[in-house]
Amino acid sequence: METTAIPIHERSPEFQEFLASLQETKQMLEESARRHKELDEQQKKTDEQMRRTDERIGFLSNRFGELAEHLVAPGIHDRFNELGYHFEAISPGGHIINGENGKSKAEIDLLLENGETIMAVEVKAKPKVKHVEEQIKRLEILRDHRRKLNDMRQVEGAIAGAVFGIEEKKATIEAGLYVIEQSGDTMKINVPDGFAPRRW
C-alpha cells in the first residue's frame, strides 16, 4: 500500500516550530562565529603584547647585564684578594677569543690575573643552571687559547649574579666555580666549607 507525505501547511504549529528551531540554530551559529572572531582578535592582541613584553625583558636583561658588570668589576678585585689571590690586574669588558678562522669562539665578561692564575668571571643578572656548563666550555677555550701563547697559568672561573637561585648556586659550586652574589650594594664571594676551586 502506497503512502503519500502530507505537506505541512505553513501556518501549522509544526511548521512554525520547525521555523523557530531553524531561526534559533541560525542565531546560535552566528553567535558562535562572532565569539570565535572575538577570541581570534583577542588572541592576536595577546600574542602582540607577549612579543612586546619579550622584547622589553630582553632589553632590560641586556641593560641589567651591563649594569651588573659595572657593579661587579670594581669590588671583585678586593674580594678575591681577601681569599689570597693577590690579583694584580682586572680587565672589565667583553674579552673575545677568536678561532683560527677569525670567528668568535668565546666571550669573557671579566678577567683577573696574577703571575699564577687567570680568573674568568661570567656576569649574569639571574644565572641559570645551563650557564654553568657554558662557563666550563668558556674556561676550556680560554685555557687552550693561553696554552697556544705559552701561557701556562692556571685558569679558574666564577659566575656572578644579582639573583642566585638555590639550584643554580649548588650547580655552580659543584662545578668548582666561585659564586659571586649581590649583598646589599656590594658583591660577595660565596665560599662554602670544603669548597675547592676547579683548575683548568
Image: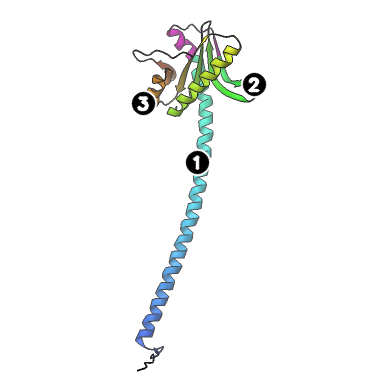
Q: Is residue 20 above or below residue 190?
A: below
Dot 1 amino acid type: Thr
Residue at 47% across, 64% down: 34
Q: Which residue is mark 2?
A: 100
Sequence-wise first label, 3 or 2: 2
Q: Secondary structure at mark 3?
A: helix
Q: Which residue is mark 1?
A: 53
Q: Is residue 49 above or below residue 155?
A: below
Residue that sits furthest to the bottom in the current view: 1
Dot 3 amino acid type: Ile
Tell me the tag on residue 166: 3
Query: Label 3 to label 1, Cα distance in Å?
Result: 27 Å
Return the residue nearer the eye: 129 or 86.
129
Q: Position of residue 46 (x, y in %)?
A: 48, 49
Sequence-wise first label, 3 or 1: 1
Q: Which residues are magenta?
A: 76-90
Sequence-wise first label, 2 or 1: 1
Q: Is residue 53 above or below residue 105?
A: below
